[in-house]
Image (cartoon, grey):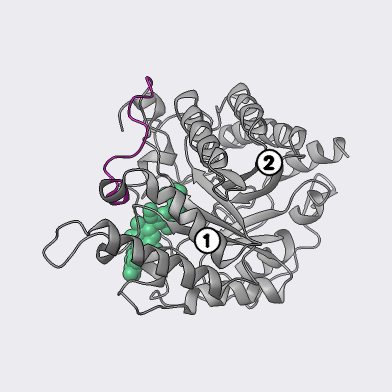
Amino acid sequence: MKNLKFNIWGIIAFSVIAFSCGSTEDPLPDVKIPEDKEDIKDEGVVAIPLKELFKDFFPIGAAVTPQQADPGTNHGVALQKHFSSITAENVMKPDALQRNKGFYTWEGADRIVQFAKSNNMKVRGHTLTWHSQTPDWMFYDQDGALLSKEIAMEQLKEHITTVVTRYKDDVYAWDVVNEALFDWDPNGVIVYREDSPWYKIFGESYIDSAFVFAHRADPNAKLFYNDYNSIFSWKRNKIYDLVKRLKDNNIPIHGVGLQGHWMVETSEQDIRTTLDLFRGLGVEIQITELDLPVYLSNTEPGSTVYTDTFSFRQKQAYSMIFNVLLDYSDIITGVTFWGIGDDHTWLDQPGRKAFPFLLDEELKPKPVYFEVQKLVQSRQ
Ligand code: G3I
């Protein structure tokens, strides 16, 4: 929150958004009978399912709740139709899987994995090591004091090994470490997020360890470092240095996840420069959390109506973004939206809907969808 210019939705909602997201404890939403969406059109053009549209380029994914991964719901039908990859929005995080030490709750994660297997979808695992959505016992003792390195390391190893081993045959890629780098520091002096309990206990070395533990548990899994604001110079250079250091030290890291919590005015040059930089690292790139709220800034008045202006902005922005991503499809091995459609997103606030996706609140293609479709077809 240091600077309004950079205070994009990728940052703000970490602390302030009222979430509509489901959890394993949430009651099941109303189950609607899915309608046939085959004939969805815009000016006579039939929508091509996203996974077909992008099949020559990269898998296309969505983050989901367990309740959405159900073929009996509209969400399940949209997932089957449009997506070839799936990520748990919350239920594979440490606090969801092991809220109490030694007691794992697999139900929500298993449900998503089972849905993916039944529908021939890839699964991206998110996330093994994070300062947020991690239970206190992983960091602190009963008196609230930070754990010793030995105990914390043993627990981290146990958690990663158990989770990765369980999903060894099902999860092809993991966000092993999430958001370890400091967000805003133009001089690059403060490299790591020093308020992270992981950093307080270990310094940076827990990052190396986490990748090693994940690799030992599943040598075939693709292992990613995942972060937001990663297209801005002050952050991308830190990511570059981190990944380079890991690779130079033979730590098993295979890719960088760029969380695409971008804006409608996101700079094409920032994305291209970032992709060029990471190309030089010889790692895969995945856009892991793509969403594009309709507002120009967080001071623009909120709306609950999707206006022509919003539509125009998204057409411009999404076309630009996918045009760039197609240019780099040799190194981009996946693009995942951080949700399915505009009905459910972490970005919504009361009276201020974000409308960040290609599918609307009824999970039907928006005009921007057809704009993207036109763009992709022109590139085939
Ligand atoms: O776990 C409780 C549950 O017990 C309770 O019933 C429910 C009632 O609202 O709240 C549940 O926790 C919420 C959780 O989502 C699951 O629904 C948290 O309050 C809420 O803060 C949490 O928000 C998630 C957020 O990460 C937390 O940081 C969002 O859904 C999720 O979209 C968001 O995802 C992150 C990525 O993991 C990392 N990158 C940034 C991205 C957006 O913040």
Tell me what residue is drawn at x 34 percent, y 60 percent. 153
Residue 170 in the image: state x and y as whole percent: 64, 70
Q: Which mark is residue 214?
A: 1
Q: Nearer the viewer, residue 73 or 173?
A: 173
| Residue 134 visible in the picture | yes
The residue most toward the top is 187
Magenta region's main secondary structure?
A: loop
Locate the C terminus and report the quarter of the image it occupies: top right
What is the CA distance from the residue labelled 1 to the residue labelled 2?
Answer: 38 Å
Part of the protein shown in magenta? 186-199
Circle number at residue 47: none
- Image quadrant of residue 22? bottom left
x and y, in percent, of residue 47 in the image: 79, 52
Give the amino acid type for the residue marked by disc 2 in the picture: Val
Task: Tell me residue 23's x, y (percent).
Answer: 41, 69
Left or right of 329, for residue 153: left
Image quadrant for the N terminus? top left
**Which residue is at the far left?**
143
User: In the drawing, what numbered circle is on residue 368?
Assistant: 2
Which quarter of the frame holds ligand 1? Answer: bottom left
Q: Position of residue 33 (x, y in %)?
A: 64, 76
Q: Mark 1 or mark 2, which has the lower sequence index?
A: 1
Q: Which one is in front, 4 or 28?
A: 4
- Look at the picture and state if 291 lies above or below 267: below
- Between tags 1 and 2, which lies in front? 1
How many other residues sit within 10 Å of disc 1, few (<14), some (14-19) or many (≥20)? many
Residue type of the residue flagged with mark 1: Ala
- The reply to whether the magenta stretch includes residue 188 is yes
